[in-house]
Amino acid sequence: MEQERKQINLAFIGFGKVGRAFARLLLSRRRWLVGNCGVEWKLNGIATGRHGTCIDPQGLPVQKILKGWPKHSDLNLFHKGPSCGSRADFIRQCGADVLFEMSVLDLSGEPATTHIREALRAGLHVITTNKGPIATNFRKLTRLARLRDVRLLYEGTVMDGAPVFNLVRRNLPGTHILSLRGILNSTTNHMLTQMEQGASFEAALKMAEKKGLTEADPRLDLEGWDSAAKLSILVQALMGGSVKPADIDRTSINEDMGRRVRAAVRRDRRLRMVSRAYRQGGKVVGKIELQELEIFDPLAAVRGLSNILVLNTDTMQELAIIENNPSVEQTAYALFSDLVSLL
């Protein structure tokens, strides 16, 4: 007997590299979703800051939009129906079941927090890759999702598509995370690796910017804010703490790094930007530190764009998750895996 198909309507806020990679992934997995989940999807709306907004209740022509990008990237041309004067209008009018919030990171959490709050209040599930709102408003947003009986999922906020939150949620029931440490920022790790090979700080930064590795504002990487946002989410979601990014002691990397990096290499050690959290006097403390590590430390072996997270637990002792040289496709997969968990 053929499985009954369910229709699910989607909407995007943000259509940058991650959003477009996710749209391509949805197209490539359309048959898989039908065969394994009994679900047909339709993209009802896309809202962006630079390329306009469009809603089509019958479903947007995703392939046509992607094929024409970026030469023909005016999304307003695909809009059908009443105009949208605001993101709140877009959320109310798009007719989606799931909103994907993929706007640019802002450490204040806005305007993404408002987008997510409006969607949850309207009864939409929300899936996001945006660290800002989850780090700054984790408890408020997760409480609102519970009250509205919808889901707020955020796997892509830390370590791209690596299953961090889903691993703990689904596969470590009853486990208490005592502490954690890791390398969470690909940009600074790539720069430190380049400096180990002789590049100056300035040359390593220019290379990272040329490759599109830095945040829109590189200071978010260099001053540890990106790592602090990710560590804040880990602390709140996995350790029950209430640490916000501004509460976390941070170390920056600067023009002096090249000399320090190569001095560590001569001692057969490695300099790494380490994010760590631990319990102290009933609280959870978070720190971002530039640490000189022994060569046999698993964090010392993580080079380039790769990330690592080591969880110290009361049931499984230490568990390490390593993601080697992730790209935008891995972040897109986090959105996809969160979507599948809703079905």
Image (tube, grey):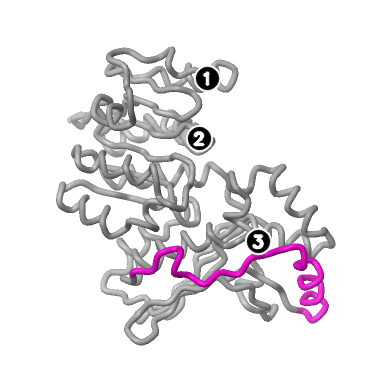
Bin the neighbour count of mark 3 within 10 Å (Cα to Cα): few under 14, some 14-19, many 20 and up.
many
Q: Which residue position holds label 3?
A: 189
Q: Which of 68 and 187 is in front in this view?
A: 187
Above/below status of 114 relative to 144: above
Left or right: residue 53 versus residue 38 is right
Q: What element carries label 1?
A: loop
Q: Mark 1 and 3 residues: CB-CB less than 8 Å, in contact?
A: no
Could you tell me how far apart the alpha carbons at marks 2 and 1 are, in whole angstroms? 15 Å
Res. 323 image quadrant: bottom right
Say which quadrant the N terminus sits in. top left
Q: Which residue position holds label 1?
A: 73
Left or right: residue 15 versus residue 71 is left
Give the magenta range: 242-268
Q: Which residue position holds label 2?
A: 21
Q: Mark 2 and 1 residues: CB-CB less than 8 Å, in contact?
A: no
Residue 204, percent from left and from top: 76, 54
Q: Which of marks 1 and 3 is nearer the N terminus?
A: 1
Q: Can residue 180 be seen in this view?
A: no
